Amino acid sequence: MSSHGVPEVTDADFAAEVIGSELPVLVEFTADWCPPCRQMAPVLSALAEEEGDRLRVVQLNVDRNPATTNAYKVLSMPTFMVFRGGEPVKSMVGSRPKRRLLEELSDVV
Protein backbone atom coordinates (compact mmCIF):
# COMPACT_ATOMS: atom_id res chain seq x y z
CA MET A 1 0.00 0.00 0.00
CA SER A 2 1.25 3.43 -0.91
CA SER A 3 2.13 5.76 1.91
CA HIS A 4 0.68 8.63 -0.12
CA GLY A 5 -2.78 7.98 1.20
CA VAL A 6 -5.79 6.02 0.21
CA PRO A 7 -6.53 4.99 -3.38
CA GLU A 8 -9.23 6.92 -5.17
CA VAL A 9 -12.10 5.30 -7.04
CA THR A 10 -14.30 6.97 -9.66
CA ASP A 11 -17.71 6.61 -11.25
CA ALA A 12 -15.96 4.66 -14.01
CA ASP A 13 -14.29 2.01 -11.81
CA PHE A 14 -16.57 1.97 -8.75
CA ALA A 15 -18.34 -1.22 -9.84
CA ALA A 16 -15.08 -3.09 -10.41
CA GLU A 17 -13.18 -1.72 -7.40
CA VAL A 18 -15.95 -1.66 -4.78
CA ILE A 19 -18.98 -3.70 -5.88
CA GLY A 20 -16.77 -6.47 -7.27
CA SER A 21 -14.31 -6.60 -4.37
CA GLU A 22 -13.93 -9.88 -2.51
CA LEU A 23 -12.99 -8.00 0.66
CA PRO A 24 -15.35 -5.58 2.38
CA VAL A 25 -14.62 -2.02 1.22
CA LEU A 26 -14.79 1.16 3.28
CA VAL A 27 -15.52 4.06 0.92
CA GLU A 28 -14.98 7.61 2.11
CA PHE A 29 -17.10 10.04 0.11
CA THR A 30 -14.90 13.12 0.28
CA ALA A 31 -14.33 16.56 -1.23
CA ASP A 32 -11.33 18.84 -1.63
CA TRP A 33 -13.18 21.68 0.15
CA CYS A 34 -14.01 19.57 3.24
CA PRO A 35 -11.73 20.18 6.29
CA PRO A 36 -13.06 17.17 8.28
CA CYS A 37 -12.28 14.99 5.25
CA ARG A 38 -8.66 16.16 5.36
CA GLN A 39 -8.56 15.37 9.10
CA MET A 40 -9.59 11.80 8.27
CA ALA A 41 -6.76 11.22 5.76
CA PRO A 42 -4.16 9.97 8.31
CA VAL A 43 -6.81 7.88 10.08
CA LEU A 44 -7.82 6.18 6.84
CA SER A 45 -4.21 5.63 5.79
CA ALA A 46 -3.45 3.96 9.12
CA LEU A 47 -6.64 1.89 8.92
CA ALA A 48 -5.78 0.75 5.39
CA GLU A 49 -2.31 -0.30 6.51
CA GLU A 50 -3.43 -2.11 9.67
CA GLU A 51 -6.58 -3.78 8.34
CA GLY A 52 -5.55 -4.27 4.71
CA ASP A 53 -5.88 -8.05 4.86
CA ARG A 54 -9.57 -7.82 5.90
CA LEU A 55 -10.72 -4.47 4.54
CA ARG A 56 -10.04 -2.28 1.51
CA VAL A 57 -10.14 1.47 2.09
CA VAL A 58 -10.81 3.84 -0.83
CA GLN A 59 -12.05 7.38 -1.34
CA LEU A 60 -14.41 8.84 -3.88
CA ASN A 61 -14.38 12.57 -4.65
CA VAL A 62 -18.03 13.65 -4.73
CA ASP A 63 -17.42 16.65 -6.99
CA ARG A 64 -15.72 14.59 -9.68
CA ASN A 65 -18.01 11.54 -9.36
CA PRO A 66 -21.63 12.72 -9.16
CA ALA A 67 -23.20 9.51 -10.48
CA THR A 68 -21.97 7.31 -7.62
CA THR A 69 -22.57 10.08 -5.06
CA ASN A 70 -26.19 10.45 -6.22
CA ALA A 71 -26.75 6.70 -6.53
CA TYR A 72 -26.03 6.28 -2.80
CA LYS A 73 -27.76 9.55 -1.81
CA VAL A 74 -24.65 10.97 -0.16
CA LEU A 75 -25.33 14.50 1.06
CA SER A 76 -22.71 15.20 3.75
CA MET A 77 -18.94 14.94 3.73
CA PRO A 78 -17.29 12.86 4.88
CA THR A 79 -19.68 9.95 4.56
CA PHE A 80 -18.23 6.49 5.14
CA MET A 81 -19.98 3.53 3.57
CA VAL A 82 -19.03 -0.09 3.98
CA PHE A 83 -19.77 -2.37 1.03
CA ARG A 84 -19.78 -6.11 1.48
CA GLY A 85 -20.75 -8.51 -1.28
CA GLY A 86 -21.52 -5.54 -3.51
CA GLU A 87 -24.09 -4.05 -1.12
CA PRO A 88 -23.81 -1.08 1.24
CA VAL A 89 -24.11 -2.59 4.72
CA LYS A 90 -23.26 0.41 6.89
CA SER A 91 -23.16 4.18 6.56
CA MET A 92 -21.60 6.74 8.92
CA VAL A 93 -21.42 10.52 8.55
CA GLY A 94 -18.75 12.84 9.93
CA SER A 95 -15.14 12.58 11.01
CA ARG A 96 -14.28 10.34 13.95
CA PRO A 97 -11.18 9.06 15.73
CA LYS A 98 -9.69 5.79 14.48
CA ARG A 99 -10.69 3.91 17.64
CA ARG A 100 -14.34 4.83 17.17
CA LEU A 101 -14.20 4.01 13.47
CA LEU A 102 -12.77 0.56 14.26
CA GLU A 103 -15.54 -0.03 16.82
CA GLU A 104 -18.17 0.93 14.27
CA LEU A 105 -16.63 -1.36 11.67
CA SER A 106 -16.32 -4.35 14.00
CA ASP A 107 -19.78 -5.72 13.17
CA VAL A 108 -19.33 -5.55 9.39
CA VAL A 109 -15.70 -6.52 8.80
Image (cartoon, helix red, strand yellow):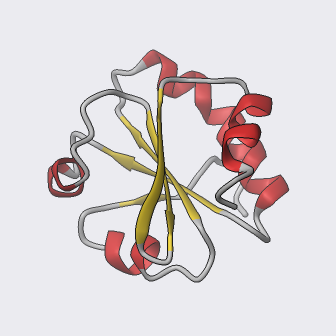
Front-lying residue, 73 or 40: 73
Tell me if 46 is positioned left or right of 19 in this view.
right
Percent coordinates x, y for residue 6 in the rendering: 59, 51
Tell me if 50 is positioned left or right of 11 in this view.
right
Image quadrant holding the C terminus, namely bottom right
* Image position of 62 with respect to 39: above or below: below
Kindly identify the residue that appears in the image at 75 percent across and 68 percent down.
Answer: 54
Front-lying residue, 25 or 31: 25
* Image position of 4 with respect to 109: above or below: above
Q: Residue furthest top?
A: 35
Tell me if 28 is positioned left or right of 16 in this view.
right
Image quadrant holding the N terminus, namely bottom right
Tell me if 67 is positioned left or right of 12 in this view.
left
Front-lying residue, 19 or 3: 19
Percent coordinates x, y for residue 57 in the rendering: 60, 56
Kindly identify the residue that appears in the image at 77 percent across and 44 percent down.
Answer: 46
